[in-house]
Image (cartoon, helix red, strand yellow):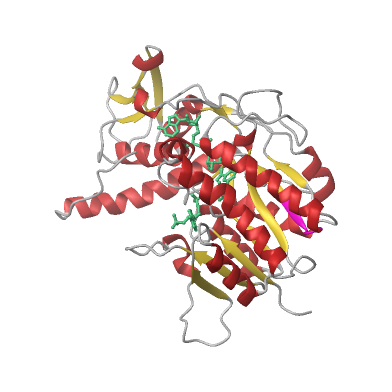
Amino acid sequence: MSQKVAFITGVTGQDGAYLSEFLLKKGYLVHGLKRRSSLFNTDRIDHLYQDPHVENRNFILHYGDMTDSTNLIRLIKQIQPDEIYNLAAMSHVHVSFDMPEYTANTDALGALRILDAVRLLGLEKKTKVYQASTSELYGKVQEVPQTETTPFYPRSPYGVAKMYAYWITINYREAYDIFASNGILFNHESPIRGETFVTRKITRAVSRIALGLQDKFYIGNLDAQRDWGHAKDYVRMMWMILQADQAEDWVIATGKTTSVRDFIKMAFSEIGVELEFKGSGVDERAIVKQCHDERFQLEEGKEVLQVDPKYFRPTEVDLLIGDATKAKEKLGWVPEYELSELVSDMMESDLKLMKKEQYLKKGGFDTLNYFE
Ligand code: NDP
Ligand code: GDR
């Protein structure tokens, strides 16, 4: 059997990195789209990098951008992929309120550009397309838990852009018979999650507080509830979706939901700290009730967290909880990670990272003081 060829947009992101590892292990030739930036932006995939001078590489990166049609057409023509995973996106919900037009261009029209390139190049029968759809489509709660048939009500420019991408994927499937599927993935996290998403923001801050690099951190809506899974489980599902008998749309979720406040408690308990929350709304704070771990010297009563309305969104998604029965029954998907394991994994990794930072600081080097 000839080697399968995949093209991943968003290869430098969290999911792109895990998916690349996964497909390489399966023997794929993986091509990835990366953006030009003034600094290296390949941290998450540097361990996969292969010297361009070496023959028979199986991991190849190309410059490009989702807003550049001719670039995408040229690359897809050259790569002739069996599978395209369209993961590239301006993926931050809060930032999408600041950059609505760019978000629409990248997330909505970007998906169209990929699908239309497949059509223009006559690859309808060869190339399968995975579209990274999202639980943000559900937005304002219409039904709990959310399934493939729950009505959509997106609540951000990001959600609305992804709604266009979702429907254009279905339209190209129906109009041109392209094997194009949406994975409606609920939140998934990992030690390489972007630092400004709430879980990673929390695990980084808790690790820094544990090591005395920071006193407290600021957060937005503590009551939001999310269905959090591990990214490693979810990229496996992206591949399974393209191996299904037919192109369809699939919800991928754990079926359990947790509030931001409870995620914070779980992260602090990894360093032996019991928290007490005081006040409410914009005045809510958290203080150390007790620290059971002798390695970390956190005194009782120390304030470690405060709500800052700056992180509230103009319109919020309050509650997400997905029902992945269809994927479990038809594709045999079983997630391997529990939320507690995800939190441990992220805390272990961030503690290691912050120890390096602590070491540098002791040596007189400036460390990062930028938090969003
Ligand atoms: P990340 O934000 O970690 O990665 C996004 C990727 O897209 C990065 O490689 C980024 O490049 C790239 N990108 C952004 N804008 C452009 C552009 N204009 N042209 C080319 N590349 C671009 O996201 P995740 O890995 O977490 O998510 C992957 C996909 O899945 C996204 O589409 C996201 O919206 C969607 N999704 C994610 C979920 C999650 O919980 N993680 C849940 C459901 C859907 P750079 O590194 O240069 O910034
Ligand atoms: P989300 O993830 O918006 O669900 O989108 P994020 O981690 O940003 O927010 C989750 C919830 O936490 C609340 N929150 C905060 N969020 C951030 N980022 N920073 C804070 O300080 C903070 N305080 C509270 C938010 O209001 C929200 O309710 C992610 C992205 O990966 C999308 O690309 C993807 O489509 C969805 O998950 C599924």
User: Quarter-wise, where is residue 239 in the image?
Assistant: bottom right
Q: Which residues are magenta?
A: 177-181
Is residue 135 in view? Answer: yes
Q: Nearer the viewer, residue 39 or 229?
A: 39
Q: Residue at x 65, y 68 (%)?
A: 6
Give the left or right position of residue 161, taking residue 301 as reference. right
Q: Is residue 290 above or below residue 280?
A: below
Q: Nearer the viewer, residue 282 or 81?
A: 81
Give the left or right position of residue 304, taking residue 223 as reference. left
Q: Is residue 277 above or below residue 243?
A: above
Give the left or right position of residue 300, taking residue 222 as reference. left
Asked whether 269 falls inside the magenta stretch, the response is no
In percent of width and height, residue 117 lies at: 65, 64
* Residue placed furthest toward the top: 279
Q: Nearer the viewer, residue 173 or 39?
A: 173
Question: Which quadrant of the figure contains the N terminus?
Answer: bottom right
Question: Which quadrant of the figure contains the C terminus?
Answer: top left
In percent of width and height, residue 83 lies at: 69, 65
Q: Residue at x 69, y 67 (%)?
A: 120
Asked whether 180 falls inside the magenta stretch, the response is yes
Q: Residue at x 40, y 12 (%)?
A: 280
Give the left or right position of residue 253, taking residue 69 as reference. right
In percent of width and height, residue 274 lies at: 41, 25
Tell me the chief SS of the magenta region: loop
Is residue 295 in view? Answer: no
* Residue placed furthest toward the left: 364
Q: Residue at x 45, y 36 (%)?
A: 198
User: Quarter-wise, where is residue 213 in the image?
Assistant: top left
In percent of width and height, residue 271 lies at: 40, 36
